[in-house]
Amino acid sequence: MNWKISIIGLILVVAACKQNKPEQLTAVSSKYLIEADGLTALAKQENTRILDFRKKEVYDKEHIRGALNIWRTDIEDSTFAYNGMMASPAQIETLFTNLGIKTDDVLVIYDDNGLCDASRLWWVLQNYNYTNVKLLHGGISAWNAIGGELTNETPVIEKSEFKLTQNPSMSYNVSKGQVEASVKNKVVILDTRTADEYAGNVKKEGAAKAGRIPNSVHIDWAEAINYGGDQRFKSIEELEEIYSKLNVAKEDPIIVYCHSGVRSAHTSFVLTQLLGYKNVKNYDGSWTEWSYFNDLPFETDSITTTKK
């Protein structure tokens, strides 16, 4: 009788373990993401260009062999009264031509900030109909993790010819006027800055005043990645839970903004390319532009300090 009881007990224990086993989480995937081991093969192809999107002093210390260096100011239009607006198609064409990038090249972009900066360039190029782009998942940390080759040698650059298509779609962009209309129509507006910026506790350099666009929902862009760890995107289940706070259908319009459209470009990537939201627009000017105009409405919770 005892052996029967033991077997029954064992079956119950196994069943309980299966029931309590944590659910397998789904890793993110996108045609615009590439893993580090995938880059080792792609890097050997003649039409692959790797872009290191970090400050030059960091790039100069070490970078992926063959990588070209760009920084935020390289893809900004400096003709505005405020900083951070996306470069014009002509500027991008000149930049890439001078870097030796050809029109049919595949660009692999990496950074050391959870793909925040890399996503900004992805977003700019999407608006200009250029889709031969991949982001290195996990950035330079992922490359280091597989023992990828690093160097401090700057590649020799030969000018090429790079051309964007005519009539850019601007499919992921929204203007100040459109945001103003959306505030009145109560479209969901997502602020991806820090909680202190959202509350108006902090005014970053470049903004005319602190605060937020009225009726904004707040979700920090960095919640989407393992920010203090490997800087990879969280699982699909975790991302769905984070952005369920928006309380909208995936077909509903969403406007995303931050300080100057960089962090919100990252969130735009997450929403559209990883979670399948269909109608997401990133406000290029973001708070830097919005705060510049005194006739635009804003909200704030508290006394402000300035932060660079």
Image (cartoon, grey):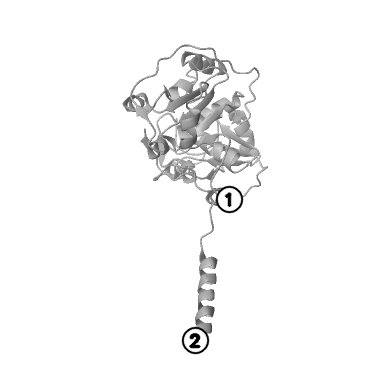
Residue at left offset 34%, top offset 28%: 62
Q: Position of residue 204 (x, y in %)?
A: 41, 34
Q: Position of residue 50 (x, y in %)?
A: 46, 25
Local SS, label 1: helix
Q: Residues within 10 Å of mark 2 (few under 14, many from 20)?
A: few
Looking at the picture, does residue 15 appear above or below residue 293?
Answer: below
Amino acid at the residue labelled 2: Asn
Residue 250 found in image quarter: top right
Does residue 289 show up? no
Residue in front for this viewpoint, 181 or 273: 273
Position of 101 with respect to 308 (left or right) is right
Of pointers 2 and 1, the one earlier in the residue sequence:
2
Read off the residue under disc 2: 2
Amino acid at the residue labelled 1: Ser
Residue in front for this viewpoint, 109 or 247: 109
Q: Position of residue 143 (x, y in %)?
A: 41, 35
Local SS, label 2: helix
Name the front one of labels 2 and 1: 2
Q: Position of residue 157 (x, y in %)?
A: 43, 14
Looking at the picture, does residue 127 appear above or below residue 299?
Answer: above
Residue at left offset 57%, top offset 49%: 240
Numbered label attached to residue 244: 1
